[in-house]
Image (tube, helix red, strand yellow):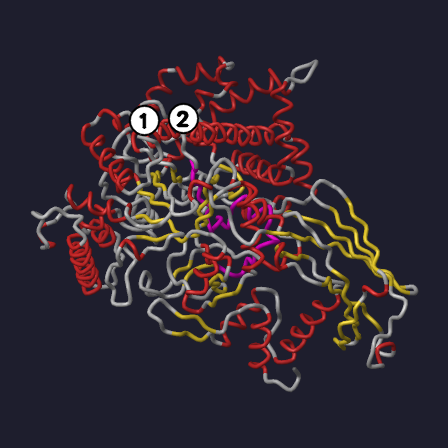
Amino acid sequence: MSKLSHNQIINELASFCGIESEYRDNWGRVHQTSVETKQNILKAIGENVDTGAQANEAWHLRREREWSRMTETTIVTSLSSMPKELVFQIPLSRAQGASAGPVIKDLEVSLEVTDEQGMVQHIAFSNNELSFCEKKLVGNCVYERWGVPFPQLVTLGYYKFCLSAHFGNYHRAQNIFVAICPEKAFIPPPLQGDCRTAGISISLYGVRSKNNWGIGDFGDLKKVVDWVAKDLHGGVIGLNPLHATFNRMPFNTSPYLPMSRFYRNFIYLDISTMEDYRDSREAQSIVKAAETQRLLSEFRASDTVQYEQVAALKQKVLKMVFKTFFENHWNRPGTETDRKKELENYIDREGFLLDNFATFCALDSYIRSSDPEVWIWSQWPPEYQRPDTEAVRQFRQKHWKKILFYKYLQWQLEKQLAQIQDYAKSRAMFIGLYHDLALAIDRFSADFWAYQDFFISKLRVGAPPDAFSQHGQDWGFPPPDTEKLRESGYKLFIREIRKNCAFGGALRIDHVMRFFHLYCIPENEPPRKGAYVSQPFEDLLGIVALESVRNRVLIIGEDLGTVSPYIRKRLTETNILSYRLLYFEKDNNQNFILPEDYPELALVTVTTHDLPTLAGFWSHRDIEVRKEAGMFDSKQALIEAIAERTIDKKELLKLLKGLGLLPGHCSTDVNAYPQITGDLHNAVVGFLAMTPSKLFILGQQDLFKETEQQNLPGTTIEYPNWSLKMKYTLEQFRSDPEAKGFSDMFRNWIKRSGRNNLAD
């Protein structure tokens, strides 16, 4: 390496660290990653590469770290492609390694294999089972690499290996995390073969009802289950991410930028059904008070969700509910009650994850009560800015009851969610709830505070310039440090997937390309100066497949944007469903594809939360909103957006007419449809229902022809993101003639397309 130039060393080191040398944008153009960008990303991950000498040293240190460890810290494989050998290396002095062949003659190697039940298998390898692989000089040390037969494991799951080697006075041992994974993710038996199903997706926060507190809750969700199962004959209900957020407008309410991906938002609790609420006179008196009832009426009448006010009121009541639980169960003298044991068991199962989350919530509340202007944990006193400090340890001891309150809330959330999924299954919905795992976390979140060592804080995730955003996108959150995650046995990743698989039959993974590579932007640089950094996708896909099979959960990968064909091919091979939108499914000539050309292993839908609804698309409402928000650079950009939309509408109209989905009397002139008509609405729903794709999900906004989208990317105060409510209340679903008409139309297409969830 010393003979190479500074730039050449940067290129070599960047390649070694997974910084991709180029990418192809969604126009098909190839962009080379500049040496400057590679250098900035290397510096962000901790490599000092300002000079040629420093870059050379960084390269050598990387190589030495690779060889100086005894063996791999983590191995993710499958039953059908298990390694033949477990390879390890032993260091020697230069003098010892002078000869060409192996120096070590009396090597003794043993292995302990521990499964998840704690069963231990001891393996002592004979001399005949040891194989010499190679000898290599790295830095000032010579290494001999050896191999032993890899244990023939026959059960999927997680294992701990302890490899020991010794000869003479040398002895070394290392633990290895091993995951034995299936080749493919789970497909529910009712979806195997050419079987398909359909359902509705909702933004739970926007559900309106006469009983909720101004935001949709789990009580509402149970009623949605009844509606989808009985009235629509659907098999699945898609939900927005239920992740915990700060519930502070307008910056901290996005379910896709949460404070935790492990735990959920207490704002969704149905307080009225909580056992401790029924036992709490204090809590009931607060709710029944005239002032509370006035507030609840205001919250329900509001066109948008009042996150802060609703959260404050719910927390006030929940503290009284918890007080009742504490007195009746937790702190009750004598024999432990069953409910106390249940919470204790839940806390034990959750371990450090729940403890860190609850501690963060308690700290945030404690510090802000003293100074309401402290909004983020980076403003906390330094001694509280990590979970492992002495000050935080003392806080846990002193404020254990406050921390227990937040643990109690998560326990109650999981109990209610489990009950709803069980109820959905009892209504013959074989998938039931379909959850959503966000890509991001807020950089001031509980997760980042607790696990900051597992993120690269000097990089931000985003997207390169594309048709959606000409300047690229900076999403403002740090990427994971996959090297550290891998060294830890992917423990956080495993728990994240497992936690989000719980209480549902399907899981959508936002921006599934994250498993393959992430577009990373160095600190203080614009998005165009970023680059893709590769991720250990085979490991991650294997773990997702294992958790999918274990939890019997269907996996959907949101693969929108710049996606290479290889990524989609690999996802299909793993049984991860693609995520296909009507707006984007076009051929090379930019014509909308036919229904039969949609892939089988896919979820089809009209749109997403970040894009216009069907009615908004047709009426150009989204273009108007973007204009009002000042998002067009010029008048010409606005004209081009309208022209492009008009072309799309003409092509879609032509296709629907050609397929016979529009009645004969319907015009082919796009100007005849300033708004989306009943015939056109019916045709679009039928078009998607007739695809061979396993899942057809229609957003409730598209079922009810709502014009406003849930989120306008790139805005905060300019648009009421994540707070718009449904057009109809739950009670109107079955009483309003127009709402019933929409339901009848959808159920008709479910029947006609063979996606019916109930027998006639």
The residue closer to the viewer here, 146 or 269, is 146
The single residue placed furthest to the bottom in the displayed view is 3
**Residue 432 position within the rendered picture, expressed as x and y whole percent measured from the top left:** 42, 35
**Label 1 – label 2 distance at C-alpha:** 10 Å
**Quadrant holding the C terminus:** top left
Amino acid type of the residue that numbered disc 1 sits on in the rendered structure: Ser
Amino acid type of the residue that numbered disc 2 sits on in the rendered structure: Gly
**Residue 100 position within the rendered picture, expressed as x and y whole percent measured from the top left:** 82, 81
Tell me which residue sits at (55%, 57%) in the image. Answer: 457
Element under disc 1? loop
Q: On the picture, is 349 further left or further right than 150?
A: left
Q: On the picture, is 93 further left or further right than 176?
A: right
Location of residue 693 with respect to 408 vertically, above or below: below
Question: In this figure, which residue is indicated by the disc labeled 1?
Answer: 209
Q: On the picture, is 557 further left or further right than 740?
A: right
The residue closer to the viewer here, 82 or 530, is 82
Can you tell which mark lies on residue 219? 2
What residue span does the magenta drawing correspond to?
431-460
- Within-10-Å neighbours for mark 1: few <14, some 14–19, many 20+: many
Location of residue 344 with respect to 239 vertically, above or below: above
**Residue 610 position within the rendered picture, expressed as x and y whole percent measured from the top left:** 33, 50
Q: Quadrant of residue 310?
A: top left
**Quadrant holding the N terminus:** bottom right
Can you tell which mark lies on residue 280? none
Location of residue 221 with respect to 715 vertically, above or below: above
Tell me which residue sits at (12%, 49%) in the image. Answer: 674
